[in-house]
Amino acid sequence: MAATRPNIPSQNPNSHAFKPLKPISISQSLLKFPSLESSNKIRRQCINSRCEITSFEFDKPKNWSDPVRIIQPFSPISNSMAAASASSMDSPTKNVKRVCLFYCDDTKALAERVAAESDAIELRSINWRTFDDGFPNLFIPNAQGIRGQHVAFLASFSSPGVIFEQLSVIYALPKLFISSFTLVLPFFPTGTSERMEDEGDVATAFTLARILSNIPISRGGPTSLVTFDIHALQISVAFPDDGAWKRFHTQLQHFPTIVCAKVREGDKRIVRIKEGDPAGRHVVIVDDLVQSGGTLIECQRVLAAHGATKISAYVTHGIFPNRSWERFEYDNGGNPDNGLTYFWITDSCPITVRAVKNKPPFEVLSLAGSIAATLQI
C-alpha cells in the first residue's frame, strides 16, 4: 500500500505509529475444531448445547454471532468509552468488574502495564518452581482468596518448553470456585500450522485449539479466550498477492494501494509489483506476523527500486526466531535502499520486545490498554 506518512500517535510523541489490530474475544472457549483448511475457513462445533456454529470465515466477522464475537478495538479507548469507564469508577452505584490477573514470567512486564491501566485489575503472582528432575512444581499463593472473583491469566506460549507449565495453571484456576475465567493469549503460536496438504501433515494449530477447548468450566461458565490477529486473519496493506487483495481491498479503499506478487525462479523468491506506483510515497507494509522476514525485505527492496521515498512495516506479532530481527536495518534518515524508517510491532512476544528495545527502526506498541479494557467486558 502506498500512502502518505500516517498521522497516528504512538508512545513516542515525535513519531507516528499504527494502532494495534483488533482483539478477538472467543467468549465460548469450549469449541471443537474438527478441521482447519488451507482455504482459511475453520469449521467449529460448540459442545455446549446452547449453540452450534457449523462454519464461518475469519475474513467475514460481521457474520459471527454469539457466543463467538469480535470485540471492538480499545487502543486507544474512545472518548465515550473512557468517559463511561471513568464514571463507573467514580460512582459507588456503578458496578465495576474487578479482575485478578495472573501472569507467567515472560508476560510480567505486560501484566504490570495492563494493571496500570485500571484500578479494577489486581496483579496476582504464581510460584513457578521446578523439581530436581526439571518438571514444574507450581503453587498459587492465597488460592482461597480468589474464590468468587473474576480471574484472568496472561499467557505467552513463546516456546514449547513453557507451554506445559502454563497449561497446568490454566487448567487449575477455573476449578478454584472463581466467578469467571479469561485466558489472554496475545499470540496464538501455531496459527501458521493449520494447513494439511499432504498425508502425514500434522496440524498443530488443531492440537492446541483442542487443548484450549477442554479448559475446565468455572462457576461462571466456559472460559473466555482473548487473542490478537490469528494468522488465518492475515491482513496486508501492501498486498503480497491476488488472494490478499481479494480479501481486504474493500476495507482499505481510503488508501492508495500496491499489489505485489511473489514468484519463485528456481531457488529464489522474487517479489514484483503487479499494480500501483510507490514513487514519491511513504509506503507501509502491514502483516499479521513476521518470522525470518525474507518476504518483507524483498518487498522493501522492490518498493525502494520503484521510487518509494520511505518504507515502514507493521506486524502484530514479531516472532523473529534465531534473532532474525537483526536483518532489518534502519534507513538512517530517509534512505529506503538501506532499510526501514519504522518497524512497528506489539508486545505480544515478550522475548522479542526485550531484544529490540531501543534499537531503530523498531518501535513497540503496547496491547496493555486493549487487554485491560477487554477484561472489563
Image (cartoon, rainbow, N blue to C red):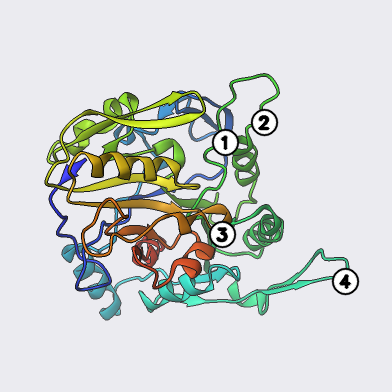
Of mark 2 and mark 3, the one earlier in the sequence is 3
Quadrant position of residue 34: top right
Q: Which residue is mark 3?
A: 156
Q: Residue beneath label 4, please? A: 132
284 sits left or right of 34 in the view: left
Which amino acid does the dot numbered 3 rest on? Ser
Question: In which quadrant will I find the C terminus?
Answer: bottom left
- Residues at marks 1 and 4, CA–CA distance in whole angstroms: 34 Å
Tell me the residue at 43%/63% (across/down): 347
Query: Callout 2: helix, strand or loop?
Result: loop
**2 and 3 marks in contact (CB < 8 Å):** no
- Bin the neighbour count of mark 1 within 10 Å (Cα to Cα): few under 14, some 14-19, many 20 and up: some
Residue bearing mark 2 = 202
Q: Earlier in the sequence, mark 3 or mark 4?
A: 4
Q: What residue lies at 18% left-to-right and 36% top-to-bottom?
A: 257
Looking at the image, is mark 1 or mark 3 earlier in the sequence?
A: 3
